[in-house]
Image (tube, rainbow, N blue to C red):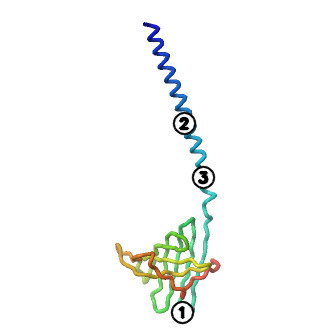
Amino acid sequence: MKNKILLSFMIVALLFSCKKADDSQEQNKVDSAKTETVVDVTSEREPLKNVCYKFDNGKDLIEANLLYDNGKVSGNINYDLFEKDKNSGNIVGSINGDTIVANYIFMSEGVESFRQLAFLKKGNALIEGYGDIEEKDGRMVFKDIKKLNFPDKIQLKEVPCD
């Protein structure tokens, strides 16, 4: 009877030690798989880029100072359009292909307002997009980004930043 108990105990111990070895091998496989799939994110990241743009036809002036950061854009824009209220503010948005869509928070005659902006990047210039807008939660936004028009008549050309 003692031999049967001892033999049973040894079999259980042997099975348990084999299971531990299998677990250890599985963990090594998982660890090596994790190591193989690690990607150096810093090598894929685009460097920060500060770019300034300007449109000046003698009557209208638009100036933008934008910071491009790996698919995102932020900065400030000033509009001084003939017979319209000046406005100046900040934008934050994203870049999808050659199109920038951003939220523009600006001051005009002492009142803070919000609207969406869109620009098409064409060479070293930005062309502002126009389309149907609607108010949502007190903010003016485009009804359909895919239906915007980008007329060539006002192009903000890249200029050196001051």
Compare residues 149 and 44 and report the one nearer the observer: 149
Q: Quadrant of the C terminus?
A: bottom right
Mark 3 vs mark 1: which is more N-terminal? Answer: 3
Mark 2 vs mark 1: which is more N-terminal? Answer: 2
Measure the C-alpha gap from mark 3 to mark 1: 51 Å
Residue 107: give x, y in percent of width and height: 45, 79
What's the amino acid at mark 3?
Val
Mark 1 highlights which residue?
A: 59
Residue 17: give x, y in percent of width and height: 52, 24
Disc 3 and disc 1 in contact, CB within 8 angstroms: no
Q: Which mark is residue 39?
A: 3
Compare residues 96 and 67 and report the one nearer the observer: 96
In this picture, is 18 found above or below 123?
Answer: above
What's the amino acid at mark 1?
Lys
Does 123 sit left or right of 109 as displayed? Answer: right
Mark 2 highlights which residue?
A: 27
Query: For the residue labelled by badge 3, is the local secondary structure a helix, a strand or a loop?
Result: loop
